[in-house]
Every structure is written in C-alpha cells, then in structure tokens.
Amino acid sequence: MKKLAVVLAGNGVFDGAEIHEATLTLYSIEKNGATYEIFAPNIDQHHVINHITGEEMPEKRNVMIEAARIARGKITDLAKFKASDFDALIFPGGFGVAKNLCSFAFDGVDCTVNLDVEKAIRSMIEQKKPVGALCIAPVLLAKILGNVELTIGQDKNTADAIKSMGAKHKDTTHGEVIIDENHKIVTTPCYMLDANISQIGDGANNIVKAILNLA
Amino acid sequence: MKKLAVVLAGNGVFDGAEIHEATLTLYSIEKNGATYEIFAPNIDQHHVINHITGEEMPEKRNVMIEAARIARGKITDLAKFKASDFDALIFPGGFGVAKNLCSFAFDGVDCTVNLDVEKAIRSMIEQKKPVGALCIAPVLLAKILGNVELTIGQDKNTADAIKSMGAKHKDTTHGEVIIDENHKIVTTPCYMLDANISQIGDGANNIVKAILNLA
C-alpha cells in the first residue's frame, strides 16, 4: 500500500490549511487505496484571523497544534519527516501555506520558505518521488525548484509571480491537474478558483490519482 | 433544489465539531444535488483542548467564530435559524456537540441543551421536516424528543444513557443509518465507532441520502 505524507499549514482557510482541501485530500488518499501520515511545522502561525470578520485576533496559535484538529491528534513535526518513509508528498492549500509555510502572502516573488518545508520537498525530489500541491501551495514548488510546470488556476498576479520565479504556468479550471512528468510535480487549482466543495472533491481526487500513478 | 441547515459545534473533534464529519456532510449535500447553509450558536466553547496532548489550554474561543473556519466565513448565528427556510436540519458530531451544544459530556442523562439548538430542532419537528445527527449528536435528539429511535453505534454507556432519556437505541456499524420514519429522525455512528475517513464519507453520504428522501 502506497503511503503519502500530507503537510498542513494550520487549520482554517485565512490563516492555516484550507479545511475542505485538507479533508478531501485525506479522503481521496484512502478512497484510492493508499494511506497517509500528517505533518506540520512546529512554529507559531503568522497571525490568527477571525474567519467571520476577516480581522486579526490578539492571539497566538501554533501551526502544528491547530493542524492536529484536522488530524484528530495524529500529527508529526515536519522536522522529523524522512523521504525514505513515503511514496509521495502532498500540500493542501489555504492562506496558511503563503503565511506560515512561506512568506509569499507578504513578500511575493521575494518570499522565503520554511526550512523544514524546503528540506522535505528537496529530499523527495532527490529520491525522484512525486510532490503534489493544491490551490496556492504550488508557489512553494516554484520558489524552491524554479524550472517546473504547474498551475494555480487563472489568477494573473499569482501566475506572473510564479513565472518570475522561473516556473511555467498553465491556466486550468475546476478539477484539472497539471502533471510535470520530468520533475514528478502535480498541481491543481481548487479554491484558487471560485469553487464549490464538490469541485474541491474532484480536484483532490484527480490530483491524488495522478500522484499515485507517478509514485 | 433542497436546502439543508448544518449546525456546527466549533472546529475540532475534542472541543468542537468533528472536521471530517462536518466537511464530508457538506460535500455529500452538494454531491446529492442539494445546497446548505451553516449555523452555529454564538457562545463561548466549554473549553479549548490541545489536540496533540489532550490537555486543556488557557484560552477562550467562540463556537461560531471557530466553526466559521469550516464554513470559510459563511456562517449564521443559530439564534436566527428559521425552520420555514429549510427542508432539513443536520448535526455533524464531535465532542463539541456534547460540550457546547449540550452538557452531555459532563452531566450525562441530566444534561441541559443550548436553547437555540432546542428551538431549532423543535421547530423542524413541528413542521414535520427531517432532522439528522451523526456520531454523538443523536444525544441531542434523545434528550429533547425522548421517544425516538436512533443510533450512536455500539458504545454501551452512551446507548444506556440514551435509553434512560426514553429513546430506543439500535446498534449499528460503519455507514449504517437508522431511520425513524414517524419522527423523521435519521442517525449514523461515524467516529463513535473506531472508523477511518472513507467510512466517515460513507456514513455522511448515506445519512444525507436518507434525509433527502424524507425531505
């Protein structure tokens, strides 16, 4: 049975992992006959957003402790990730990817990437194992790897930033997956488009199938 | 198109709504051709649990603000719920149901139920519209309605408590749904059993189908 590592950026679309994308990725992994282990970096969130008002709350939360809510407590510090234990690595989206896993939300093209995230991605690529990314998470791959082909949907500003990082961007619509066979990189837009939850289910299922085909 | 009201008890299995049950309920509603609106009571959570250690954290969080993370910001105060606007009402599970929507986790048979929750359920029953409950959420229906037939899976202590409240309990396994045709009550065990996420998907899909058949 193939085993995927899933990296979560917290718990909630505006400051963490997008919950529908994260849950439907886990669901798709099991439905397609594979298994998973969940990881998150053990760091403070950039900030905490009230998801009703969109305003910042005067609180501190830890990415790994909050992501454990999606993982039902079964979560591992990303610093302990070993590429040799897994067949593939996958990143659901959410603003937390661009705020906690890297600084793209604030610094754009000049963003920095969390070192454990970079190490996890590079070690998979070195072992020629596939890496998948949903929604905004492909920016991590563009920043770290540069010359890859991927999608974040149709948002021109984000696509332009990705091109500035050296990557090739392909426009996509709901449920579509871009497969870079050379680098074993698969990406799908999910909530980077104006989507409903069944379209997210389609995207998650399609990217998991594609990643398992490459693994 | 049929419209369901979904009530969330927060965001996280140990102190709020179980995230997989909540997300897969929303997904099943759309996949079965219906639509939804999400509600939560505007109250403080009973407490905040660190989902890695299981320990209480020295924080206060609001049920509706946290549930908005699952709802991606689109959530309504349960006090504003009107039965006439919906074809059915459904409660995903999680300890938050037994800690925030009622006090069953602490008071068992003698628990009290949040007044907005009770009003929402009673108003649907008066209008002969179906009410569904996953996981531990059927305790709400047993406490409020008494003489109904339902399931929380196979946990003897919880089943005994439900019987003491005047309800009839039926043991069930993964994905099974108990339908009380007289009262239009449908229930399924989900994570009240030792389940994996694809079994939760089956349970959510089956209960949504059953509730739409009754609606």
Image (cartoon, coloured by chain):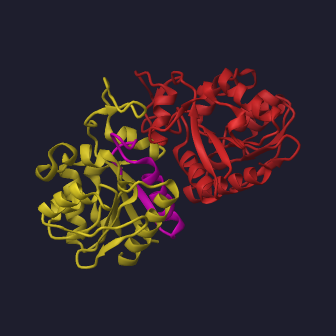
Chain colours: A yellow, B red
Residue B97 figure quarter: top right
Between residues A189 and A143, which one lies in front from this camera angle? A189
Between B150 and B25, the one nearer to me in the picture: B25
Q: Which residues are magenta?
A: A8-37
Residue B103 visible: no
Q: Quadrant of residue A25?
A: bottom left
**Residue depicted at 14% across the width and 65% down the height:** A146
Residue A174 location in percent, x, y?
42, 64
Query: Residue B89: where, in percent of width, then height?
Result: 69, 40
Q: Is residue A114 above or below residue A211?
A: above
Position of residue A17 in the picture relative to residue A164 (left or right): right
Residue A93 location (% of width, % of height): 35, 53
Q: Is residue A192 magenta?
A: no
Q: Is residue A16 magenta?
A: yes
Q: Is residue A139 left or right of residue A88?
A: left
Residue occupying image coordinates x 83% and y 29%: B164
Q: Position of residue A135 (x, y in %)?
A: 34, 57
Q: Is residue B57 visible?
A: yes
Number of numbered tags placed on the structure image = 0
**Would you say B118 lies left or right of A120 here?**
right
Residue at 53 percent of width and 39 percent of height? B13
- In the displayed structure, A95 sits above or below A34; it is above
Q: Is residue A80 left or right of residue B75?
A: left
B56 above or below A39?
above
Between residue B157 and residue A125, name the one nearer to us: A125
